Amino acid sequence: MPMKRSVAALTLTLLLASSIRPAASQTIGDPDTYEKSLQVALEAIEEMGPYDNPEQAARVNRIGYELAQHSQFQKYPFTFTLVAMPVPNAVSLPGGQIFVTKGLLDLGLDDDMLASVLGHEMGHVIHEHSLHLQRKATLMNVLGNLLVAGVLIGAERNSKAPALQAPYDPRYGYNPGNNAGNLVQGAAAASLIVSELLLRSYSRQNEDESDVEGLRLSAAAGYDPDGERRMFELWVHRAPETREYGYLQTHPFMDDRARAAEARRGEFKIQSRSSADAYRQRTQAVLMQYLKTMKIKEPPARSRPMETPAEAALRYAKPTAREFLKESALAVWPRGATADSLRLEKLHRLRDAERSKNSELRDYGAVLHAYRKTAAEVRGLDPKSELLATLDADIADQEAKRKAGYPAAAAVVKGGIYETAFLTAFLSNYPDAREAPQVALALGDAYSRIGKEADAVSQYLACWKAAPESAEGKRARSGLRLLAPSLKELAALQQLADQDQDADLRRLAGERLVVIAKSYDDLANGAEYLRRFPEGEQVVAVLDRLNVLADNLYSEVVLYQGFGDSAKAIDRINKILTNAPLSPAAEKLRDHALIDKTS
């Protein structure tokens, strides 16, 4: 008599059978949800910043689509985008948009490990976990319909408003409740919603279901599912002292998941790897068709209260929905006529933007870099591509214009009257010119005058290294020695601590860095250090101080709400969410946010 098959064996058989079915055709089954998800994706890029790394982008897309073709998921096209956040993380949105951070890639995951992460995020989309979280669904509706009237930040969830005669609490204000002046609007509301969507964790059941889906997809695509277990081990090993900073916080229950991954070893049979080219081409076609019919009204760029023009210039610009979709379509399938057309359109947009500037400020260096980088990518994909001739002709034209502009630019330098923008363009256009050390020194002086210490140090170091014995090089070294004792920017101090031209300066900067890392008072200072030096020697101290500062700002948020000063409350909320999105203070903001759709 045949042995009765266990439920586990039957489940495994079904999973393996599903992994070898032909790939499903992609669609956009729910345009409304896809549009809302797309808008959140744009906000996310503005918050985190794009990460330009073609090699890693190609790798993520290759592995991602090798997994996706075995998913049988038809409702939305998967897209994979790299963002500059130094925090190791990966997040997914309901419409199939998956984001991978620079911090995650910097961990050095091998392909099996990366496949497990991508498969896990795809699992959240496939199983539509966001639809089971009412709070997230509500936030999506508010942002997607552009009805963000405001967010109420309560000191305690569901707390009752005190009587008017209640004593004022400096931590919480009067806490007047939902009917009074606790309303913050605009950028703060949008930031809270994006932060909630991207950083909220799922339930244990959702996480476990996504882990299983990731294992299934990895094995079906020819990757070793044991990569998940090894990924957990690497993650915990690489960030033992900063568990709250990244994936370990936003994807919780890590210990349980690691044990489950160990228990599942050997359950999934690794299949032969197969090309995803056809699947990727179909995905690109879906995105291009959607571009032709999309009706999304591009929202205006968010304004930030109390933001100076200099701060606005440093903030990442949010791409339009069309730009995001075109970038996604190019990443999906980088070969062929459609890809070449998208590349050329992007380059021409950059070229024409520079042409519209005053001739002295045109950055031919940036344009040429973009053209040459694109040409190298195309040659690597298809040495016989017809696009190469067009790119070579445009490069020759831009190169001629760059060289023709040198005499006039050199005359401006000699005249000694110039703006910072001109100096930046000169170094980009003529990095090897004899005037370059002089220009770098002048740019360092300019940055020093306006308090941009890290940029000043970068330019002084460039000048010093380029011509150490020249008059400019000696002045740059003197500038660094004068700056070092009073530097407050952590990134500037780390640069000096890393240089090897002056041992005394290196020692002085290192000692001051230890002190400032524990005492700095500007949230953006710590965030910039973590962005530029995610593995710096003072990361733990900087992060600890960052959390303290964010908590202080949270107290100010509640204080200003109690006074009815929404502008100052919004300013503090933006600082927390922009510079410390994973801090306990940001968590409290998300916990205590109540969406007001009727104001």
Image (cartoon, grey):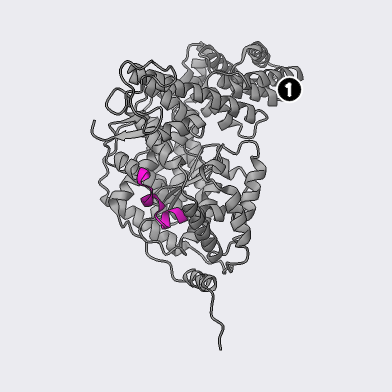
Residue at x-position 70% and y-position 21%: 510
Question: Looking at the magenta stretch, what is its main secondary structure?
Answer: helix
Q: Is residue 471 above or below residue 137?
A: above
**Which element is circle 1 on?**
loop
Q: Quadrant of residue 252?
A: top right
**Residue 367 placement (x, y as % from top left):** 46, 35
Q: Does 180 appear above or below 378?
A: above
Q: Residue furthest bottom?
A: 1
- Image quarter in which the C terminus is found: top left
Residue 53 magenta-highlighted: no
Residue 325 in picture, x, y percent from top left: 37, 47
Residue sitting at x 56%, y 22% = 455
Start-end of magenta stretch: 123-136
96 in relation to 564, above or below: below
Which residue is located at x 51 percent, y 32 percent?
Answer: 584
Q: Where on the picture, by quarter, is residue 338?
A: bottom left
**Image quarter in which the N terminus is found:** bottom right
Magenta stretch encompasses residue 133: yes
Q: Amino acid at mark 1?
A: Gln
Callout 1 crowding tier (Cα within 10 Å): few <14, some 14–19, many ≥20: some
Q: Residue at x 60, y 24 (%)?
A: 491
The answer to whether residue 456 shows anywhere in this view is yes
Residue at numbered disc 1:
501
